């Protein structure tokens, strides 16, 4: 396929496919190339130095294929590596944290915002920092929810187990009287229903994947980077390990089958 | 510390510490050096080729430090990489699958054996193959239980969530009328109580960590490799990423605090 001018998207694994899905819904005419760094998944438990090293490798592989924009569709890599990538790369680099933070600030009425994510994302304080820049008076309450990732990958998105896990993680957060809850991990949209049921109707959920897709559309328009719409859009998927497993699990995250999954050494 | 003549043990992360714990209980006078490959954890979702590459790197790092025996304390690496390591290394290489399989065959009366582990270990068919060599008539029923690893790492080893997860995974296996169940993942000893409650009294659990420690003692004796007992044993821990997190989570797996955790580039 012709990859020149595609939107490049990377994540440590399948999670970023929820972001890709929202991008393809919002700018359906754009070609995309997705890299899942499945040989090194997960990033969420690793140190900033290690995550930056991996993110650089992923970014280089995608820029070598001529992408016009890079989306870091991984909260941990967004937290640790986006500033480095922005300095080093000659193209727009979008992350998932900025858009999620902006949407949360727009939605909250009381200024009490909850954020859930991996241990790495929560420890990075990236969401509280991003929210504080936009709304210095907001109060942000964070909770790492490590089991949500394997639940989503298992496809256990409904029933007794995810409900029990959601209560175990969220009950304490809910006692802080938050009115907005950011799904600060790209796996969590698969659990949105059980999270919403646990949180109750009064709490607005922020899906970082949707917020990021909005930012992609806005950035393409602002920089005049939108495609000409003359060719049919291409979807290309790359992984650094185990393409079959990626295809099988990833289809649930992307919402449809993944064609052209190619192994790359990175 | 003087690492010459220590027993080298490696795993992708903290799980192998349950094996190390049993080794230190069984041969308490032996010095040990443990490597947790936390930069690449988990191995259980990765391809055989990738796991072999990682296992070689870990083994080389430990043999460079003069160990006298290598224990592959990771079921996935045991399944994929032990034959390669045995061919390439000039010292005894023990795995966790052979000892677990031998103990299961010794314990079963009906020949109906259950095995639980990561997706990688189950897909490898390493336990059924090892059991078939020892007891060709045995029937082996396998079930991957991916959520048990994050449960153990979260310290959720008791209560509603692990019970619900254990039922979701084990009920189908129990309907096969197994009389023996192999904990085919080094994380699972932390969940032994909830697994035993779910399985019921009639089913014998096989802890691969205990079985491996027995094999270590037997091999040291058989090859005349036991220490002279003149020096006090050293415990040394190496990790390829995030030593603090390893120390914190690992203490639960080892059963006491981990001192001297050192970062290594591998």
Image: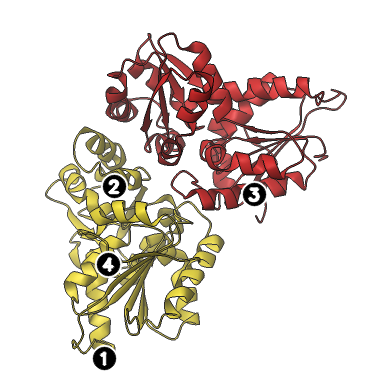
Chain colours: A red, B yellow
For marks 4 and 1, give the one nearer the viewer. 4
Cα–Cα span, label 3 and label 1: 49 Å
| Same-chain status of marks 3 and 4 | no
Q: At numbered mark 2, what does the secondary structure look like: helix, strand or loop?
A: helix
Chain of residue at mark 3: A
Is residue A256 visible in the rendered structure shown here?
no
Chain of residue at mark 4: B
Along the polypeptide, which appears first: circle 2 or circle 1?
2
For this view, does B90 lie left or right of residue A6? left
Residue labelled with disc 3: A56
Residue labelled with disc 4: B20
Q: In which quarter of the image is residue B163?
A: top left
Q: Which residue is drawn at 29% across and 70% down?
A: B99
* Vertical order, B241 against B92 (above or below): above
Q: Residues within 10 Å of mark 1 (few under 14, many from 20)?
A: few
Residue A153: where, in percent of width, then height?
Answer: 46, 37
Question: Residue furthest toward the front?
Answer: A136
């Amino acid at each position: 396929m012709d990859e020149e001018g595609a939107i490049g998207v990377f994540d440590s694994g399948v999670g970023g496919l929820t972001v890709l899905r929202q991008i393809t819904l919002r700018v359906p005419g754009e070609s995309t190339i997705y890299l899942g760094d499945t040989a090194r998944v997960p990033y969420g438990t690793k140190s900033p130095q290690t995550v930056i090293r991996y993110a650089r490798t992923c970014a280089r592989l995608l820029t070598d294929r001529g992408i016009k924009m890079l989306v870091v569709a991984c909260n941990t890599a967004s937290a640790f590596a986006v500033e480095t990538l922005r300095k080093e790369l000659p193209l727009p680099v979008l992350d998932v944290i900025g858009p999620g933070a902006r949407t949360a600030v727009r939605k909250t009425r009381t200024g009490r915002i909850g954020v859930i994510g991996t241990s790495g994302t929560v420890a990075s304080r990236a969401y509280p920092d991003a929210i504080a820049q936009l709304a210095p008076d907001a109060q942000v309450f964070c909770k790492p929810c490590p089991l949500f990732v394997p639940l989503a990958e298992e496809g256990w998105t409904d029933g007794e187990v995810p409900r029990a896990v959601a209560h175990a993680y969220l009950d304490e957060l809910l006692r802080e009287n938050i009115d907005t809850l950011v799904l600060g991990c790209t796996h969590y949209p698969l659990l949105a229903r059980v999270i919403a049921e646990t949180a109750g109707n009064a709490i607005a959920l922020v899906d970082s994947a949707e917020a990021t897709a909005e930012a992609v559309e806005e950035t393409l328009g602002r920089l005049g980077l939108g495609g000409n719409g003359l060719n049919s859009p291409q979807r290309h998927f790359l992984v650094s390990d185990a393409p079959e497993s990626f295809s099988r699990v990833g289809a649930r995250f992307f919402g449809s089958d993944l064609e052209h999954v190619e192994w790359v050494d990175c």
